[in-house]
Image (tube, helix red, strand yellow):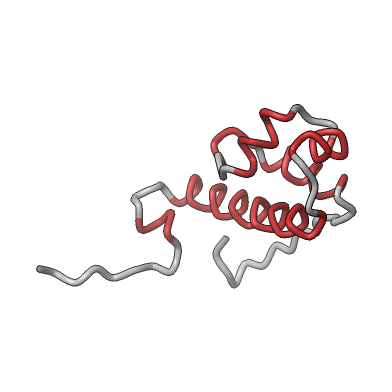
């Protein structure tokens, strides 16, 4: 069996093209940040839905990690509603 060489990005390793892998990596980071904040608050999905001004089924999707259902824009807005503003740093020396 030939050893697998990872590129340190699971999305690259799974064969996504560079642009899509970068987008997925950003969404994953945003979703992890949201999950961390929601865990601190220890709210029900109904309470979370009211706080974030989105439906309870969308909270369920978020909690289940259904990344494909959320845009970067929506995830940034959710973090803002949680009091966690997002800042973007663009550096040509590093990959997304």
- What is the x, y in percent for residue 93? 59, 72
Q: Quadrant of residue 78?
A: top right
Q: Is residue 6 above or below residue 39?
A: below
The quarter of the rendered structure image containing the C terminus is bottom right
Q: Quadrant of residue 56?
A: top right
- Please name the residue shown 59% across and 33% down the image: 69
**Foreground residue among 83 and 50:** 50
**Foreground residue among 69 and 71:** 69
- What is the x, y in percent for residue 3? 19, 72
- Please name the residue shown 35% across and 58% down the image: 13
Q: Is residue 63 above or below residue 57?
A: below
- Please name the residue shown 77% across and 46% down the image: 76
- What is the x, y in percent for residue 46? 79, 34
User: Is 13 positioned to the left or the right of 75 in the image?
Assistant: left
Number of labels in the image equals 0
- What is the x, y in percent for residue 20? 49, 45
- Please name the residue shown 57% across and 42% down the image: 64
**Foreground residue among 13 and 48:** 48
User: Is 22 positioned to the left or the right of 72 in the image?
Assistant: left
Farthest residue toward the left?
1
**Foreground residue among 75 and 65:** 65
User: Is 3 positioned to the left or the right of 82 in the image?
Assistant: left
Q: Quadrant of residue 60?
A: top right
The quarter of the rendered structure image containing the N terminus is bottom left
């Amino acid at each position: 069996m030939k050893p697998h060489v990872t590129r340190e990005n699971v999305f690259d390793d799974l064969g996504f093209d560079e642009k899509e892998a970068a987008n997925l990596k950003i969404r994953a980071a945003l979703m992890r940040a949201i999950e961390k904040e929601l865990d601190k608050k220890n709210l029900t999905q109904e309470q979370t839905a009211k706080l974030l001004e989105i439906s309870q089924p969308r909270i369920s999707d978020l909690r289940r990690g259904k990344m494909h259902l959320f845009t970067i824009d929506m995830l940034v807005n959710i973090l803002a509603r949680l009091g966690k503003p997002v800042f973007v740093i663009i550096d040509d020396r590093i990959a997304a």
